[in-house]
Image: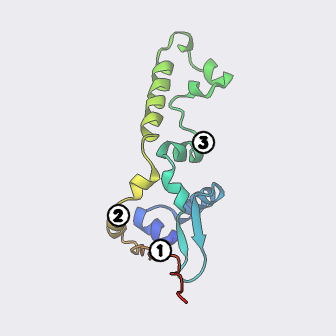
């Protein structure tokens, strides 16, 4: 678990901005938060299977490369070459390729080297939960009379 302050300091991100991001990720159900002295936040187990593309699509509201992508009439009127422009199609293909690449990778892949990343960022190491080994119990032996 890491605190908002630790993440803010490690990445040089505004604490206020990070609080908004954490709220958004929480609303999406992608993080767990724990209050209190040893509290903080972390990705929940299901989040590791999210693709990077899914995260970008859900958290970014404007990844349009040029104004004419918006589909709004105003942006079309402001472009004098709109009727002959080939760039819009190229940019659309590039954006599709961008998301296709992001969709190949998961959050789990990015967080795999967690101890090494934590050390680089000066974050507290995340303790690995201890899981009890399952014990197989054989059926009781018959009691002889």
Nearer to me, 60 or 48: 48
Query: Please, which residue is most extreme toward the bottom here?
Result: 145
> What residue sits right under mark 1 in the picture?
136
Name which quarter of the figure residue 97 lies in.
top left
Q: CA distance from mark 3 to mark 1?
A: 51 Å
The secondary element bearing badge 3 is classed as loop
Closer to the N terminus: mark 3 or mark 2? 3
- Which quarter of the figure is the C terminus placed in? bottom right
The secondary element bearing badge 1 is classed as loop
Rendered residue at 43%/40% (across/down): 104
Mark nearer the viewer, 2 or 1: 1
> What residue sits right under mark 3 in the picture?
61
Closer to the N terminus: mark 3 or mark 1? 3
Mark nearer the viewer, 3 or 2: 2
Q: Is residue 127 left or right of residue 23?
A: left
The image's colour scheme reads rainbow
> What residue sits right under mark 2 in the picture?
117
Dot 2, how many residues are within 10 Å of its Cα: few (below 14), some (14-19), or many (20+)? some
Rendered residue at 53%/61% (across/down): 45
Residue 140 position (above or below residue 92)? below
Closer to the N terminus: mark 2 or mark 1? 2
The secondary element bearing badge 2 is classed as helix
Q: Position of residue 65 (x, y in %)?
A: 50, 31
Q: Position of residue 93 (x, y in %)?
A: 46, 24
Residue 21 position (above or below residue 90)? below
């Amino acid at each position: 678990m890491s605190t908002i302050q630790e993440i803010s300091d490690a990445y040089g991100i505004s604490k206020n901005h990070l609080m908004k991001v954490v709220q958004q990720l929480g609303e999406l159900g992608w993080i767990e938060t724990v209050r209190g002295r040893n509290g903080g936040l972390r990705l929940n187990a299901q989040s590791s299977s999210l693709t990077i593309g899914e995260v970008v699509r859900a958290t970014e509201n404007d990844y349009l490369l040029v104004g004419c992508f918006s589909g709004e009439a105003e942006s079309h009127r402001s472009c004098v070459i709109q009727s002959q422009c080939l760039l819009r199609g190229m940019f659309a293909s590039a954006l599709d390729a961008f998301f296709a690449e992001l969709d190949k990778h998961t959050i789990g892949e990015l967080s795999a080297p967690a101890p090494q990343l934590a050390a680089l960022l000066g974050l507290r190491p995340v303790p690995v939960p201890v899981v009890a080994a399952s014990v197989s119990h054989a059926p009781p032996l018959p009691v002889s009379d």
